[in-house]
Amino acid sequence: MSLLFEDGHLIHGSDSALTRFALAPGYHQWEDIREALLSRFPQFPVTPRHGTTGNLTLAAEDGDSPPELRITWRDALCWLHLPQTRAAAELTEETFTKLAALRRASDSSPNPAWQTEAGGRIIWHNRAYAALKRKAQYDPESGGAALFSTPSPEHPNRVCLRSDEGEKPDWYALTTTTEDHIQIYHATCINAVVAAEEAQRNFVQTLAKTFAHLSIGLAIFDRNGQLALFNPALVDLTALPAPFLSARPTMVSFFNQLRESRRMPEPKNYKNWRQEIAEVIAAATDGRYQETWSLENGQTYSIRGRPHPDGATAFLIEDITAEVTLTRNFRAELEQSQSLLDALEDGFAVFSASGVLTFCNAAYREHWKQDPDKSFAEITIDDAIHVWRGMSAANPLWPDIAEFVMCRGDRAGWNMPIYPHQGPPLSCEVSAIASGATLVRFHAVPVEAGRQDRIAAPLANDRRQPSN
């Protein structure tokens, strides 16, 4: 077996030598063969000998073949001769063919592969590993062990290629197997995976910074039902300790802790608690969960559950105590105003700018038998005038009321007399109020007893009068 080097680069070799050591002219160098033979020939030179002419014979420390190594050099050329035993010389052509096929497969692989002995020294590598070795920072005395960095405890199967400062390192997924006390390594480039993970981390950090300013508590659970993301508002609203949330509790643990801290209504039947929580989780997964929690301390929370991609579930907790209090106060004021107007004897009816009856008091409903709350359809000003006209004497000013209600410009209030078929005469006052609405007021007009019989119909010359 013979190998020829020029200035440390392999330029030629016999088939048996190239097959035995998996070398290829033009790709491998002096340190490659040194790595393969150093364990058997400890005196193997670090660099190829050069000079006028010379030779060197080294004996192997074990009894394996070849037993000795001869090095011959002349100028920049250096020969390695390894005598073969008779058994090695009798290798069949089929064996050489298989070895050549294996060498082609390993050298054509785009992924680095190498083997180390029990002491960690590299004894073989393929062409992809050699290319990385030439590219990276490499110490020949290290035997190649320092080409990749040591895996971190967080990622025991991931290593990066050592590079110059300022350059972005290349990341590889490392696979290790052991055969006959030999460690076999295969590295696969995962730069795209690392870049995607970094982009995901940056995106999550951006979301976290955005969520940190929200007043709504946010809790996102992953597909396994564990808390994956939360914002500071969740800590403030739920009073749950941050270490508990950072430990990624499950949904059941999360809601159970809410119950213990009295940040959700106490269940009526604790035996069915697990079943109720399971129903909450199922409803949130389908996007159907939305409830309002009234707490013991007087606060009111709005809870919504929404499904997220990849099987995740998000819960949004919002403090709506101020809105609920405002709504209750507003409703109380409306009820008080309604009671006050219902206590008046005059009838009041309010029509919107579009001419729809939006409010009336008890006196109006009793006298004109109209109630917008019990009507299937909206009551318009035309519907109301039709009722007024049918229950009172004829009056030419009815259309003027409809025109006043539908008018969009400045409007001056006025009044007109109405003579119902039953009951005393009424004064109908029409006035403009806020938002383009119109107030129609009906109040009784005192009439002398002697004149009551003479009022059977309005006078023909009745006209509307400005209201006071």
Image (cartoon, rainbow, N blue to C red):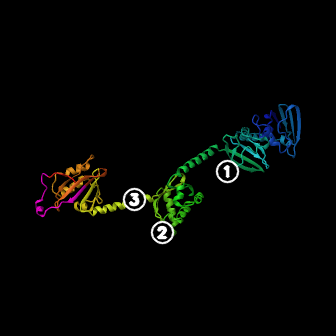
Marks 2, 3: nearer the viewer: 3
Marks 1, 3: nearer the viewer: 3
Front-most of residues 283 and 176:
283
Under circle 1, the secondary element is loop
- For badge 3, the amino acid type reads Thr
As drawn, the label of residue 327 is: 3
Where is mark 2, residue-wise?
268
User: Residue 41 in the image: x percent, y percent?
Assistant: 85, 43
Look at the picture and state if 309 lies above or below 373: above
Residue lying at 53% horizontally and 57% vertically, measured from the top left:
234
Residue lying at 82% horizontally and 42% vertically, measured from the top left:
37
Residue 219 shows in the view: no
Q: Which residues are magenta?
A: 440-461
Residue lying at 20% horizontally and 50% vertically, measured from the top left:
399
- For badge 2, the amino acid type reads Lys
> In the drawing, does residue 166 fall left or right of residue 388?
right
